Image (cartoon, grey):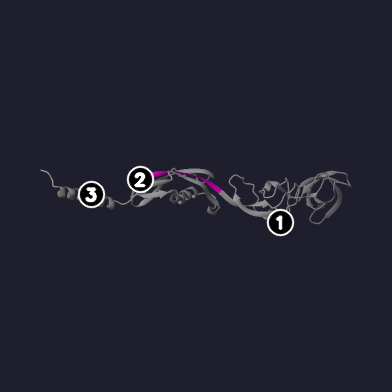
Amino acid sequence: MRLGLPILLAVLLLGWTATAATAAAAPAPTVLATAQFRPLFVEAVCRNAPWPKEKLVVENITARPDTLAVPAGEITYRVTNRPQAKYLGSKSLTLVVLVNGKEAGSIKMTGDLQLYDQVLCTTRRMRRHDTVHAGDLKLVRQNVTMLGSDLARDPSKAIGKRLTTSLRPGSVLRTTQLESPPLVNRGDLVTIIARTDHLRVTVPGEAKDGGAQGDLIRVKNLMSRKALFAKVVGNGTVEVEF
């Protein structure tokens, strides 16, 4: 039996209407982008790190794929292969995306964990043996990840010291580049002090070595002509044990 044209059109129209209604009722998929994953990556990388959180910066974050379409629903995440937080440098992890508790995809992420801190930098060109003054230094916050552990951070411990090497303007200052200025130079005439609880004796001497405060140097007693070791205690002054 053949269907009449009106009936056929009605059947086709009803079928299209039902299909369209079903399509309209199905929720559109959710598209996730890299920007949504960044906070999760940063939190996972910085968790349990031994450095203060405000000094940590995660740079060069990438995600593959950079977008992920998942079904509509409640979205949660699970991190696998969580990276070691006690080391700086390159980090990677896999972020599993769950929709209503079911795995809907995964994203591989990488980034660099960097340490930023305040360090002392020079404000001018300085030569070896220059004495450091307050105006020669400024505190600068910068990436110190690869700079080692001997960075100078406290101005009070640098001012008054002298440099062991020449530095360009903007150079990061290291504690190993600082030394106390000598209070006695080789060949100087010095006062040798020997003391006890009730007696203090001074004699003239000659320095055979140079030295800073607290250094033990060789001196020659100009009265007895004997050589001995003495501790530098001031400008042109050394002290020996009685």
User: Residue 16, labelled with which disc?
Assistant: 3
Residue sitting at x 54%, y 54%: 54
**Residue type at mark 2?**
Ala
Q: Is residue 127 left or right of residue 39?
A: right
* N-terminal label among 3 and 2: 3
**Residue type at mark 3?**
Trp
Task: Tell me the distance, in whole angstroms, between the alpha carbons under discs 3 and 2.
Answer: 31 Å
Q: Quadrant of the N terminus?
A: top left
Query: Which mark's residue is nearer the viewer, 3 or 1?
Result: 3
Q: Which residue is mark 2?
A: 104
Task: Tell me the distance, in whole angstroms, between the alpha carbons under discs 3 and 1.
Answer: 82 Å
Residue 24 in the image: state x and y as whole percent: 28, 52
Q: Is residue 6 left or right of residue 173?
A: left
* N-terminal label among 3 and 1: 3
How packed mark 2 is, by other alpha carbons closer than 10 Å (few <14, some 14-19, many 20 or more), is some
Q: Is 180 within the magenta?
A: no
Task: Tell me the distance, in whole angstroms, between the alpha carbons under discs 1 and 2.
Answer: 59 Å
How packed mark 1 is, by other alpha carbons closer than 10 Å (few <14, some 14-19, many 20 or more), is few
Magenta span: 102-114
Q: Is residue 188 left or right of residue 48?
A: right
Q: Report helix, strand or loop for mark 2.
A: strand
Q: Is residue 199 left or right of residue 122?
A: right
**Residue type at mark 1?**
Gly
Magenta segment main secondary structure: strand
Residue sitting at x 27%, y 50%: 23
Q: Which residue is mark 1?
A: 135
Numbered circles on residues, count: 3
Residue 96 in the image: state x and y as whole percent: 39, 45
Q: Report helix, strand or loop for mark 3.
A: helix
User: Residue 179, labelled with which disc?
Assistant: none
Q: Residue furthest left?
A: 1
Q: State the residue in front, 114 or 179.
A: 114
